[in-house]
Image (spheres, rainbow, N blue to C red):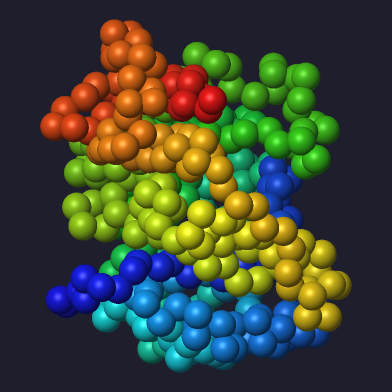
Amino acid sequence: MIKNNKMRELELYVHIPFCVRKCAYCDFLSAPAGREVQEAYVEQLLREIRGSGSAFGEYEVQSIFFGGGTPGILETDRLCQVLTRLKQEFACAEDAEVTVETNPGTVSEEKLCRYLEAGVNRLSLGLQSMDDRELSLLGRIHTWEQFLDSYGAARKAGFENINIDVMSALPGQTVESFRRTLKKVLALEPEHLSAYSLIIEEGTPFYERYEGHPELLPSEEEERRMYYDTKEMLAAAGYRRYEISNYAKPGYECRHNLGYWERTEYRGYGLGAASLLGQVRYTNQTELTEYLKGNTRGTSEPLTEQAVREEYFFLGLRKTDGVPLGAYGAHYEELIKKLTAQQLLEERDGRIRLTDRGIDVSNYVLAQFLD
């Protein structure tokens, strides 16, 4: 497709805050809800979207992402209706990436065929582990066999771009059990893999259970071994690490992810959804009862030059390709020299990026760019 150079790029995000059961480690804005509440939510979502595209006449949508929660929990017609409304409101690129996150056990081949017909062309399946005991400890609703059924249904339906989420450093997980998960997942040949290490978030059941009890989790040495196994096994299988936690076959990098790290403007819809428009960040209403009443407006935060500068590096350096030094390079000249001397950053052709060593301690490196 030949793109109109006058059009500005835009991404759309739709938050579906419902799930069958909240996982014990999850701190996202999500919770179980009955069909009546889900129906009311979709109606409000459609009202929020209606007419909003008129303010984006100079934009072309490059990606649409349904996240949650578990978007796949919605009735098929309802999710497709939301997607259709978005396409009516916005000018979408012919090859726009349209992703739906879902969990095993919430989709069928029939539902997935309907998604494809409506324009969904990318699926993200939350596996986390192939070990049923580990899945049970996480509070997941599915087994390995149920995941295989859902993955097989997606392939039969015709999906040619599938992401699988896996997690390491889980309670009861060993280096060997994590390797088995990676081997099983790689044998399926998904186009994309997101590999995250478990973070114990305050306010979750896991925080109450494991905070202050490191002996119940894999050791720091075991966690580090899992990290290197991920990097080595995926590289050997032909996956390119294009971001700290994301790997893809050539040409299957997630546009939604890349747009976020490159600070492409985005418009969010739904409970608690965030938007970045110009140099202002918006967050929708986070109380479900208020959102359902039509009180969608939350907070807005004009970004200072300092905040934009920090985000440029803090987010952009997550990509393995790094970022151009650009206009902000001079501000961090001394810091960049120091981190380069420490072999944590490298500069090439006007761009800086994390070295392998820098990726290993990325939290430390990225934090240095927060003034």
Location of the C terminus (image quadrant): top right
Nearest the eye: 280 or 123: 280
The number of numbered badges drawn on the structure is: 0
Q: Name the quarter where the N terminus is drawn.
A: bottom left
Q: Nearer the viewer, residue 334 or 341?
A: 334
**Against 38, is 240 above or below?**
above
In the depicted structure, whether residue 301 falls above or below residue 6: above
Q: Image quadrant of residue 117? A: bottom left
> Which residue is at 61% across, 41% downward?
134
Q: Does the image show residue 35?
A: no
Q: Is residue 195 above or below residue 347?
A: below
Is 88 left, or right, of 337 in this rendering?
A: right
Residue beneath the point at 74% across and 73% down: 296
Relative vertical location of residue 346 with respect to residue 56 in this rendering, above or below: above
Q: Position of residue 281 (x, y in %)?
A: 59, 55
Instruction: Look at 67% across and 58% down and name the residue there.
Output: 300
Q: Residue at x 36, y 14 (%)?
A: 334
Nearest the eye: 50 or 144: 50
| Residue 22, picture quadrant | bottom right
Residue 348 horizontal/vertical position (percent): 16, 28
Q: Where on the picture, by quarter, is residue 104?
A: bottom right
**On the rendered structure, is 74 left or right of 65?**
right
Whole-percent x, y for residue 72 in the image:
57, 73
**Residue furthest out toward the right:** 289
Let me know if residue 73 appears in the view: yes
Give residue 207's position: percent from left, percent from top: 77, 33
